[in-house]
Amino acid sequence: MAEIKKFTMGVDPDRDAWLTNFYTENHLAYEAFPDYVASPEQLNFIVHLNGEKLYYPCSDELFAAIIEKRADTLLTSAYMEIWSRIERLVREVVKDEFKEKYLLSLLSIKFQHEASSKVLLPARLEKRLLTIFTHISEISRPLAGCKALENRRAAAFLERTDFQQAFNSLKGLEINEDTTLDDIDLQQHILRLRRLLILSTVKEIWKENTPPAMDELEELMNVPIKTDGWKWASDWLQDVISGRRRPYVLWIGGRCGEIIFDLAIIKILQKMGIKVMLAVKQGFYYHRISFVDLLEDPILHELFAGADFITEPAISKNNLLDRLHSGNRLLVISDGTREQFNPLLTSITFARAFKEADLVISRCPGSRECINNHFLFTRDLVSIVREESGKVDIGRKPHHPAAIRFSESALRRKAESLIQMARDEKDQGKTIMFYSAIVGSIPGQLEMAKQILNVFVEHLRTTMHDIVIINPGEHFEEGMDADDIMYMWEIFQRSGVVDLWRFQSVSDIEKSFELMGKKVPPEWTGKDATYSTGCTKEMEIAMDIQSKYPEMQLIGPSWEKFQRRKEYGVGKLYDRALAG
């Protein structure tokens, strides 16, 4: 593999300017588009940057060529492929001759303008052209009829008697005197999955009125898949069958026709005890399945009737886990985009689903360029794409070895351990106080916030008798983000063991600086728990708990003063700006 060039800022001012131009022109700079681009913390849910400051959703080769201003050949070729797709789309779906010519002329002007700078990523250029197309054409669901027809053909194929006979055939099972029932259980699941994966490459099943002959398909579907990715996935599934894991899988869905096979595969995974989250597109992107398709395509609407649709673009960790726990229903989410996989632009809900998953499976061939660069993800990712009819390419990108994952069960165990400790102390007649304080709400003041917290808690411990003070800062572990912390502490807080819940006040902070022998600096003057979005969330929890345990006392600023904060940042240890 060729050496990857790492571009750092502060060496060459001209290149730094061009680098900044690359991110702003592609609308990928969080600082310039904070409501559109994922924050660094949200990005860290998906990509483990390992100290790198820059992430780009394209190949290393293309990024280096753009930054070094030698990308003409690579970009021109990619741009022309995009124009070919756009032109074909317009001619296929726009029936009015005048409007067709107008659209093609407008899109051509935009294409020439955007392509001239040689800085725009192909996926970003395509997104802009498609946005113009969907707005100007005023076609609510382009290609809807074609997609519905292909889905109907694929669904009808899976219902055929001759397919069911071939699909349930014992051919390929390896049974001897040493074979156990567990072996057979694993083999039959793997065999069915392999058959569906192979058949999902045979486009003729849904592209043509008459699919290929069943004897031909039966021969195809029993051909072994010989890739390292498939071998790894089979071993991973064996762990599931053996009971060594009960995982969550995030399945990034593919295209029409193929989605019917995806759903059949997902049903098998669910039978194996796997909870599945299916991610589709937010809106139109050629033949890729979108959220609207699932609701309005008759076949898809029927097949997804029992699924749980998550429409919120920014679901909380607790809410997502609650939905995963409620039965074995398929969870359906949007990735928040109308383009190829791009971690910088996906929704908060998608980022959280990625973070909670044990394995991510991608069915998107166009995403390979983004997947196959030097960056590693926080989760193992298996990419499944069609090479040709009857041949599937299954590749695996292992997660970054330094990625830390606090599983739901690990966080719950930690919370329950703290609950038991608190109950033991209460049995000895002691009072339990929980102390909520600013930890990272002031950018650049994280270490000072911890020092203030620790100094004041120690002060309280020396002045109060028979009180156990829970200081959240003393239970932080490296790698935890705000989602993990809030999830763990909410379990503890809702247990009913807290007698006093104290929220940091202005006087608490002033006392901390006095104890440290320092004056209160400007950035800390007038600050209290109401300045922290995390504390605001905890005050909401505290008030709810107090309604169930009226004897619990709240100490600190009043609830009304907390109303100015927004939702706590995604994965952040500091907050968003004050609400306007």
Image (cartoon, rainbow, N blue to C red):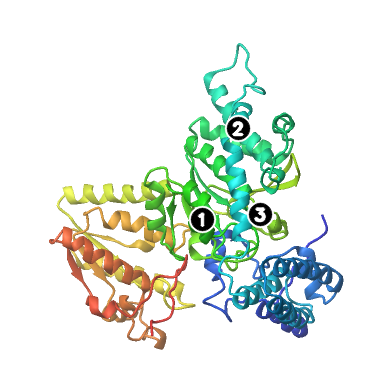
Q: Earlier in the sequence, mark 2 or mark 1?
A: 2
User: Which quarter of the picture shows residue 388?
Assistant: top right
Give residue 524's position: percent from left, percent from top.
Answer: 38, 83
| Residue appearing at x 75%, y 85% in the figure | 13
For residue 364, which numbered disc appears in the image?
3
Residue on which the image places disc 2: 192
450 or 93, which lies in front? 93
Q: Give, as a three-letter code, the residue at label 1.
A: Leu
Measured in 3D between alpha carbons, the distance from the residue under mark 1 to the one under mark 3, in whole angstroms, is 18 Å
Image check: 529 left or right of 34?
A: left
Give residue 285's position: percent from left, percent from top.
Answer: 63, 64
Query: How many neighbours does mark 1 have within 10 angstroms: few (below 14), some (14-19), or many (20 or more)?
Result: some
User: Which quarter of the picture shows residue 506?
Assistant: bottom left
Q: Give, as a three-letter code, the residue at label 3.
A: Cys
| Residue appearing at x 60%, y 58% in the figure | 145
User: Please, what secondary structure does the residue beneath circle 1 have?
Assistant: helix
Q: Give, as a three-letter code, the residue at label 2.
A: Arg
Residue on which the image places disc 1: 294
Measured in 3D between alpha carbons, the distance from the residue under mark 3 to the one under mark 2, in whole angstroms, is 21 Å
Q: Earlier in the sequence, mark 3 or mark 2?
A: 2
Relative to 169, is 300 above or below? below
Can residue 384 be seen in the rendering of this structure? Answer: yes
Give residue 535's position: percent from left, percent from top.
Answer: 33, 70
